[in-house]
Amino acid sequence: MALVAFAAVTPMALLVAPALAAQLGTEMGIGPSQIGTYFFVENGAFSAASLLSLFWLGRLNVRIVGLVALTVFILGNLTTPMVLPDYTGLLFMRTVTGFGGGTLMVLSMISAQDAGNPDRVFGYWVVGQLVAGAVGLALLPHLFAAYGLASFYIVLGTVTLLLSPLYKGFLAPAASEAPKPNAAAPGSRFVALAILAVAAILAFYVAIGGVWTFASMAATQAGIEGASVGTILAIASLFGIAGSMIAAFLGGRAARRAMLLLGYAILVVSIVAVATLHGGSAYIVAICTFKFAWTFVLPFIIAEAASRDRSGRLVASTTLIIGTGLSLGPLFAGNLLEASWSLGSVFIAAALCGVLSFACLLISPRPEETS
């Protein structure tokens, strides 16, 4: 329960990115590049927490670290409305808040890695995120219409405060144990393989971040307007829940590499479909398929990366990689749009990032092949 809860609330800005991006543009009057910068800053701070975790893992009491991070995340969200509508102040507050959330995510991922069946646990990890995202996308348009942008941060801080008694759960017992630096003896070949795993996750999240952040813009271009966009994206998130639950069911039962091939194939095809097909019905099918593929393949990607290093260092740095990808995706997409790229061209570039991600995993052998 703790793992699912905190994995859901900490990356909430990404999970509801289409609705949040639209509200930022409407209420604050900022353009695509500034919206992209917002997500770059928030997700960048989220990922930067992983760098510090490489120092404190195995050295500091993780319960104290977790409590401090939880406090920062809650207070950061609750105080963000005080700086609105100042754009610079907003970026500063989201930097501080993102750092707290990223630290919580590191602890969550270490707990998931140490489970007996990480494929399945990462599946449940994604399920929690998708449930939260579906609820957020369904409710936020109505919440924004009534109370404005500040309501998102107040609700997020309040929900996290209510969940705070659970924080000890994902720190015991696995995450409270120090990682074993000597669990693997990486040589130059192992380091190269770890780099490929890192590149795979980075490229995957660059693609995801770019497409999902501007999914509402694609809906508008497809002729879908108003609150219907939020409803469709919430429905797409339900398909995402289905994808992650199927991944959780298949974890440990099906060949991981076969699932990776299937998931990536569906993902790339769906992104190309969003970019090239026209009309509301085609958009709905494509975006629902995209969300399904994203969440179906993600647990297998992370489990594959985690299998490279049982010391915990690589999976702890995964938060850095994820956050970097989620930061760069919206930033690149927003700047390309302002540089007169069409949305379809941006999405095709995202599809190519998906192909690159799969290629990196494909040429990265299994752990036993490094010995």
Image: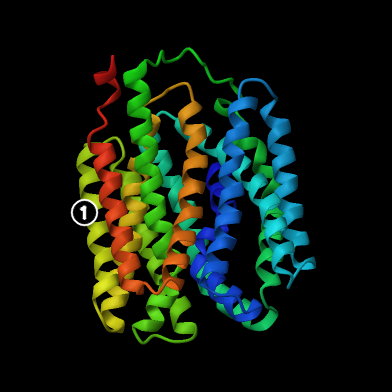
Q: Residue 61 lies in what quarter of the image?
A: top right
Residue in view at x 65 percent, y 43 percent: 166
Judged from this view, the residue extending furthest toward the front is: 339
Q: Could you tell me which quadrant the C terminus lies in?
A: top left
Q: How many marks?
A: 1
Q: Secondary structure at mark 1?
A: helix
Give the residue number, with chain letter if any, for mark 1: 265
Picture coordinates of residue 58, whole percent (x, y):
62, 20
Residue 278 in percent (x, y) is at: 26, 81
Is residue 191 visible in this depiction of the protein? yes
Q: Is residue 140 left or right of residue 277?
A: right
**At 44% across and 75% down in the image, what residue appears?**
216
Name which quarter of the figure residue 304 lies in: top left
Q: Is residue 139 above or below residue 321?
A: below
Q: Is residue 195 above or below residue 229?
A: above
**Residue 46's x, y, as percent?**
59, 47
Asked if residue 316 is positioned above or below residue 291 in the image, the reply reads: above
Quadrant for residue 194, please give it: top left
Q: Position of residue 359 (x, y in %)?
A: 24, 42
